Image (tube, grey):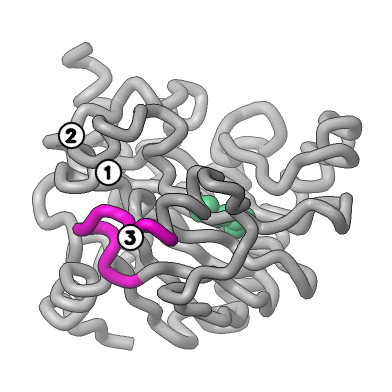
Amino acid sequence: MVVNRSQLNSNYDDQGYFVIRNYFNAAEISSLRKVILKFHELWKHDNADFYQQEAFNSSLITGSKYLEFDDRVMFFNFISSKKIMNVVDSVISDNPAFMNTQLFFNPVNPQQKDFWHRDCQYDHDVEVQKKVIHDTQVLHLRVPLFDELGMELVPGTHKRWDSDEEFDVRQEKNGRVSSESLSTGKKIKLAAGDLLLFSADMIHRGLYGLDRLALDILVFDSAANFVDYVDDDCLPDISMLDKIEDPRLFMNTIHLKSKG
Ligand SMILES: O=C(O)CCC(=O)C(=O)O
């Protein structure tokens, strides 16, 4: 499928997200699912208490702890494949860099509710959040491995501050809680094979339900100062770089790391 980069860029610019339906074929999803399920089973076993009590995601999937060389190489090749890079390049035209991967699943405890947030709220107080949403943003590329209820997003909030309702719910102020519904929320149902790209700093929440297992690839603009968020072990080593068809997403991160 040929993507129209300028259309994607303008959708992202206006709304903070876009979806491409049926972007990956069944064979692509099935080989990815095989590797990710291997990681997930080992991770759940190793983090049994955390998984049972409160977890709704894991991260560092490209790292060496659970996946072996060949699976990691396959996974790095997926992350930097033409399909993914075409989409990444449509939003970040200059030196996009790999940050991390995360895997989202349903919490075991059915009382645990999906919650609104901007990713930057975990790193910054409110005054700084107001500034950083106008700076370079981190992108999430969500690849659902099974059909899922998807994400709920507030379109346009990658570029604007919260309304009073959004702020109170997201920050749990004035008696509101972050799992309440928002009148401005837009639900994006996703099927295996779809790709959703969204800004990490827009107001969003994952929707729990069905058998969700969604891979998020996180990418940032090299001009922004996010390299400290990258774990060295999650990058390909020299022997793997040789086996990656287009390693520039990782090379950009490695280059930033080498500059300190
Ligand atoms: O799917 C989820 O549970 C939350 C997803 C999310 O917040 C994110 O990808 O930043």
Q: Main secondary structure of the magenta part?
A: loop
Q: Nearer the viewer, residue 8 or 28?
A: 8
Q: Which residue is mark 2?
A: 224
Q: Nearer the viewer, residue 175 or 146?
A: 175
Looking at the image, is 94 positioned above or below residue 189? above
How far apart are the alpha carbons under marks 1 and 2?
7 Å
Can the viewer see residue 164? yes
Regarding ligand 1, which quadrant of the image does it lie in? bottom right
**Label 1 close to label 2 by CB (< 8 Å):** yes
Q: Is residue 8 left or right of residue 54?
A: left
- Helix, strand or loop under label 1: strand
Q: Residue at x 59, y 53 (%)?
A: 176
Q: Is residue 160 magenta?
A: yes
Q: Which residue is mark 3?
A: 163
Q: Residue at x 64, y 67 (%)?
A: 207
Q: Which residues are magenta?
A: 155-165
Give the mark toward the camera: 2 or 3: 3
Residue 61, quarter of picture: top right
How far apart are the alpha carbons under marks 1 and 3?
27 Å
Q: Position of residue 100 (x, y in %)?
A: 45, 39
